[in-house]
Image (cartoon, rainbow, N blue to C red):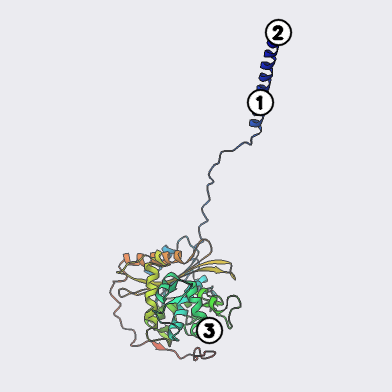
Amino acid sequence: MKRFVLVPCIVLSLLQLAGVAAVVQQQKKSVLPYRKKTVPVKRKAPPPAPDQTTGDFVDGDDLTIRRAAVSALAGFAGSVVVVDPATGRVLTMVNQKLALSTGFIPCSTIKLVTSLAALTDNVVSKDTTVYTSRYVTYNMTQALARSNNQYFNILGRRLGFDRVHHYAEMLGLGELAGLDIPGERPGALAAEEPKAGGVGMMTSFGTGVSMTPLEMAALLSAISNGGTLYYLQYPRTPEEVEQFSPKVKRNLELAPNGIEDIKPGMRGAVDFGTARRAGYDPSEPILGKTGTCTDFQSANHMGWFGSFNEVGTHRLVVVVMLTGGRVNGPVAAGVAGQIYKNLSAQRYFVAEADVKKRSDLPEIISTMPCCSAGHQQ
C-alpha cells in the first residue's frame, strides 16, 4: 500500500521540479538584453573645397592651360602652377594666394635635390646599389621611382649638411623664384642641421625646408631644360605676353650627366612607382616626383607632384600642391595627369610652335654669386 502512495508523490515532485525549471528558463529569457537592429550609417560626403580661383588674375594666362588646370583641381584644396621650361614664363597659376605664400614642407620631392647633389659630388652613381636593410638594395632609379626614404636618408648622411645646403641654394630653395611677381614670398632653408632626425630627415622628408609651388616649378624647369635656372615671370596682360623676354638666373653647376641620370627614376615613378595615377603613356611620357607628409607648422597634410613632359613642341612643367583632407602625392599625380590628358585631347602638344622670333638668346641677369658660403668639397 505504501508503494502505491509513494508513486503519486514522486510524480508530483517531478512535475513541480519541471515547472520550476521552466519558470527559471523563462526568467533568463526575459532578462536577456534587447538587441537593436543595426542600421548602416550613411556618411556625409565631405564639403566641397572652396573655389580655388577666387581673386586670381588671368589676363596674361594661357587660357587653354588654365581651363585644363581648373577642371583637374576641382574638388581639391590646393594650387597648380604651369610653366614653360624653355623660357620661365608662368602660363597659369591656380589659387595664386596659396602659390605665392611662404611655402610648405616639400616632403619627398626634396629627393630630387638630394639626387643631384649626390651625383655631382660622386657620392653615388646612377647604378650604385645601396643597402637600405640587410637584404634589400636600391639604385637611384629604383629609389626615386619608389620614393624609398632610407636610401635618401643614407645619401644625406654621406653628403653632410654643408653640401646639402649648398646644392639646395644652387637649385633655388630659400629664395624668390620669380622676377617682380607681385605678392610672391620665398620659402625657407634651414641654416643648420635639423635637430630631429638630422640631415637624413632633411634629404628624405624635407625637414627644415619650406618650398613654394613657384620654387618647385623653377627647379623642375631647370631639370627639364638641361640645367638653366630661369627667373619665373608671370605676364599679367596680353601686352606683357607680347613683350615677354626670358631671363636666366644662373646655369647650374652639376655633374655632366646628373640631370639625365635622374630622369629614368622620374619616369619610373609614373610608369610603376608612386606617381602611377598620372597615367603612363609611352607615346606621351611624363616625368615626375611625388611627395606626401604633414606640414606641422601649418597643420596641413600635403600632397605634392612636380612634373614635366617630353613630347611635342609645347613642353610644360606642371606642379600640383594639395593641402588638407585625404590628400597625398599619388592623388596630386592624378590631378597633374588629368591636366596632361585634357591638353593632349585638344592636341595641344602637337600644335605648331610659335614661329615668331622674339629674341636670339635669353637675357642673363647678373646676380650675387650663389652658394659659395659653407660648401666643402
Return the residue at label 3: 160
Report the amino acid beneath label 3.
Answer: Gly
The answer to whether residue 248 is left or right of residue 17 is: left
Q: Secondary structure at mark 3?
A: loop
Report the amino acid beneath label 1.
Answer: Ala
- Could you tell me residue 87's position as x and y percent? 38, 81
Which of the two residues, 158 or 357, is positioned nearer the viewer here? 158
Please name the residue shown 54% across and 86% down the image: 162
Q: Residues within 10 Å of mark 1 (few under 14, many from 20)?
A: few
The answer to whether residue 165 is left or right of residue 315 is: right
Return the residue at label 2: 1
- Could you tell me residue 65's position as x and y percent? 38, 69
Query: Are the residues flagged by discs 2 and 1 in contact, CB closer than 8 Å?
Result: no
Q: Earlier in the sequence, mark 2 or mark 1?
A: 2
Q: Secondary structure at mark 1?
A: helix
Separation of residues labelled 1 and 3 (CA atoms):
82 Å
Which of the two residues, 75 or 321, is positioned nearer the viewer here? 321
Report the amino acid beneath label 2.
Answer: Met
Query: Which mark, by number, is residue 58?
Result: none
**Splitting the image into 4 quarters, where does residue 248 fall?**
bottom left
Which of the two residues, 376 or 104, is positioned nearer the viewer here? 376
Return the residue at label 1: 21
Q: In the picture shown, does residue 71 fall above or below 106?
A: above
Q: Residues within 10 Å of mark 2 (few under 14, many from 20)?
A: few
